[in-house]
Image (tube, coloured by chain):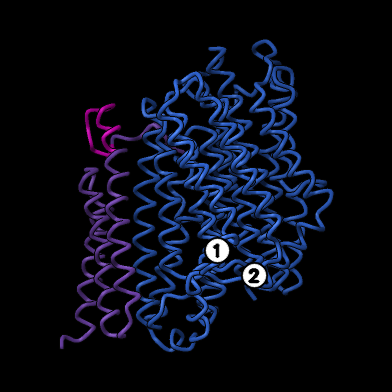
Chain colours: A blue, B purple
């Protein structure tokens, strides 16, 4: 009999999801607000259980689920994002008739992400990936009267489904060459894959499949549309959570399972990382929709994280893993701030209603919504990599690992990109603080304020006091190498 | 016994047809059908490998992936229905509010 207590965080998440779904059936729209608090409690419990179980190592269910430092770290990332999202969604779902569906989908998406983090078998990896993907497809199209939401959802669905097919096709070749689907067994029989030309086919297909999920250029087309079209709280989950799922799966698949083919994929990732960060930053400069700008900046950040696959030293992997947590707080928080502004514009009926997240709607935000503006400033400066924020520490570790490994050219490109990105982040800050407001001051609803403060606290804590987080990330990187 | 390469060739052909269809068609239902074709070519691969490597993982995987493909189609058609109700069309090249 397996020790199910090891899966306590997952059980907490799925139980909360099912209870909310069942309770929602019997409740009126007005009383459904309580479901948001319930979801927050459930996620908080799962978060505490995950932190408590740090340091445990086990494999379960015939070696398909592995619980180690890497999976625990990424569970922490996903649960932190879900916590922020579910707190903010209390306001988003106020008086909505579909609250229980929203929260159940969010929780099931989180469950999928958590199982991707601990998957040690391609079957489980694929199923968990799909669980998270299906839930987020539905969430992206949650505003079914809003043509933008539907358009974003459709594009996300089509490209997501194609990438799943590519991934499955690639996995089938890995299985064919090695005769097993277990990631650790594949790693042990690495020579089978390296000698077989099928291995190369598998690498190409898997890079394309995971490239779509991680939104690396040229597999990025869906990301800006999906992030801009979806409700802002969902964009936060997509950019901060579901993208990280691609990274943890890619860490397991490329660094562990396909280690024998490292020269092949390392070179590809080098090109992808450089192209992604440059393209993302250059296009972000010309955006007028803040959510779309954040989406392109998210591409650039994915490019930075992908540097970990290129450098491949323990320090670089530590940096990449640390970066995913930092990025979860920064990007999650930034999208919540955009959600607060969208809420303000739609309730006040002032400004550009056609594009509620237009840059012009951020004019004078420092006077209209001081807390939102302050938190947004922290997030964008963290995204640009300015001390003392999480973004600075993450970039510092990652870029210095590239220099240490003798890849100065890569570090130089990344630093130049960070400098370029400062332009559009600073422009947003200029709009918020140096231009005069177009409306009166507005009180920020408590859920948005709480979510913003939570993520700002995360960003600052990781910047000012990075040792424990770096320690965790280092433990996680040890699982890989 | 039919050589393995024939199965792989058929699967690769099906996969390419599916990928080509997704990239060239404008009709939402056809695109979803083409995605199903891609997923099924992967299933064919898995089952063929399973029989030639004498392991069962591939067949189990194929059963899971068939179920997942059905679920995927359900989500996809739900989004397509919502789009149809709004635009009265299922041609996806009409979706062009979000760009650049």
Q: Nearer the viewer, residue A404 or A242?
A: A242
Residue A48 image position (x, y, % from top left)? 68, 49
User: Is residue B84 covered in magenta?
Assistant: yes
Horizontally, residue A476 falls left or right of residue A466, namely left
Q: Nearer the viewer, mark 1 or mark 2?
A: 2
Q: Find residue A118 and name its label.
A: 1
Is residue B36 something that shows in the picture? Answer: yes
- At horizontal 46% and vertical 32% (from top left) the residue drawn is A23
From the image, tell me which residue sits under label 2. A57
Q: Are marks 1 and 2 in contact (CB under 8 Å)?
A: no
Q: Chain of mark 1?
A: A
**For the residues tagged 1 and 2, is the chain the same?**
yes
Horizontally, residue A86 falls left or right of residue A201, namely right
Mark 2 Cα shell of 10 Å, populated few (<14), some (14-19), many (≥20): few
Residue B1 image position (x, y, % from top left)? 15, 88
Per the model, the C-alpha gap separating discs 1 and 2 is: 11 Å
* On screen, residue B12 above or below A302: below
Residue A69 image position (x, y, % from top left)? 66, 65
Q: Nearer the viewer, residue A52 or A164?
A: A52
Q: Nearer the viewer, residue B49 or A120?
A: A120
Please, what is the dominant secondary structure of the magenta stretch?
helix
Of all residues, the one furthest to the left in this rendering is B1
Q: Chain of mark 2?
A: A
User: Is residue A76 covered in magenta?
Assistant: no
In which quadrant of the rendered view does residue A56 lie? bottom right
Read off the magenta span.
B80-93
Is residue A402 something that shows in the picture? Answer: no
- At horizontal 44% and vertical 30% (from top left) the residue drawn is A24
Q: Nearer the viewer, residue A254 or A81?
A: A81
Dividing the image into 4 quarters, which one contains the C terminus of chain A?
A: bottom right
Residue A372 image position (x, y, % from top left)? 69, 27
Of all residues, the one furthest to the top in this rendering is A440
């Amino acid at each position: 009999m397996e020790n199910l207590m090891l899966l306590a965080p997952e059980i907490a998440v799925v139980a909360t999801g099912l209870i909310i779904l069942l309770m929602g059936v019997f409740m009126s729209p007005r009383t459904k607000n309580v479901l948001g608090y319930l979801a927050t409690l459930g996620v908080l419990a799962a978060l505490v259980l995950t932190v408590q179980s740090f340091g445990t190592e086990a494999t379960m269910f015939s070696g398909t689920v592995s619980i180690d430092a890497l999976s625990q770290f990424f569970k922490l990332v996903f649960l932190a994002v879900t916590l922020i999202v579910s707190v903010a969604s209390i306001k988003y779902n106020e008086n909505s008739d579909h609250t229980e569906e929203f929260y159940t989908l969010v929780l099931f998406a989180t469950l999928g992400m958590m199982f991707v983090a601990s998957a040690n078998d391609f079957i489980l990896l694929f199923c968990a990936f799909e669980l998270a993907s299906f839930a987020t497809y539905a969430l992206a199209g949650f505003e079914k009267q809003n043509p933008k939401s539907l358009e974003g959802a459709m594009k996300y669905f089509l490209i997501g489904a194609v990438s799943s097919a590519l991934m499955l096709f690639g996995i089938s070749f890995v299985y064919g060459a090695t005769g097993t689907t277990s990631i650790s067994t594949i790693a042990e029989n690495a020579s089978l894959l390296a000698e077989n030309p099928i291995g190369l086919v598998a690498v190409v297909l898997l890079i394309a499949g995971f490239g779509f999920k991680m939104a690396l250029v040229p597999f990025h087309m869906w990301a800006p549309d999906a992030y801009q079209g979806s409700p802002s709280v969902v964009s936060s989950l997509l950019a901060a959570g579901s993208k990280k799922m691609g990274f943890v799966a890619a860490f397991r698949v490329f660094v562990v399972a396909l280690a024998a083919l490292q020269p092949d994929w390392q070179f590809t990732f080098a090109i992808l990382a450089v192209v992604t960060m440059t393209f993302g930053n250059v296009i972000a400069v010309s955006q007028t929709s803040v959510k779309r700008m954040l989406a392109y900046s998210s591409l650039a950040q994915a490019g930075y994280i992908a540097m970990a696959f290129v450098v491949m030293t323990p320090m670089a992997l530590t940096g990449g893993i640390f970066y995913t947590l930092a990025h979860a707080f920064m990007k999650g928080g930034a999208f919540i701030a955009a959600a607060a502004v969208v809420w303000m514009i739609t309730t006040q009926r002032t400004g550009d209603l056609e594009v509620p997240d237009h840059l012009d709607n951020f004019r004078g935000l420092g006077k209209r919504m001081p807390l939102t503006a302050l938190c947004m400033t922290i997030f964008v400066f963290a995204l640009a990599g300015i001390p003392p924020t999480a973004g600075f520490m993450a970039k510092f570790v990652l870029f210095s690992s590239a220099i240490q490994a003798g890849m100065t050219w890569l570090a130089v490109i990344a630093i130049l990109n960070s400098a370029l990105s400062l332009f559009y982040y600073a422009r947003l800050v200029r709009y918020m603080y140096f231009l005069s407001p177009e409306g009166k001051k507005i009180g920020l609803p408590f859920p948005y304020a709480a979510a913003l403060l939570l993520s700002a606290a995360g960003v600052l804590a990781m910047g000012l006091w990075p040792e424990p987080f770096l320690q965790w990330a280092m433990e996680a990187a040890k699982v890989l190498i | 016994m039919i050589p393995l390469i024939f199965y792989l060739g058929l699967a690769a052909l099906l996969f390419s047809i599916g990928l080509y269809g997704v990239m060239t068609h404008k009709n939402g239902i056809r695109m979803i059908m083409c995605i199903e074709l891609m997923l099924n070519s992967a299933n064919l691969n898995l089952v063929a490998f399973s029989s030639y490597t004498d392991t069962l993982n591939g067949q189990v995987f194929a059963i899971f992936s068939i179920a997942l493909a059905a679920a995927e189609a359900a989500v996809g058609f739900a989004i397509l229905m919502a789009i149809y109700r709004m635009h009265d069309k299922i041609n996806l090249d009409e979706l062009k509010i979000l760009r650049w």
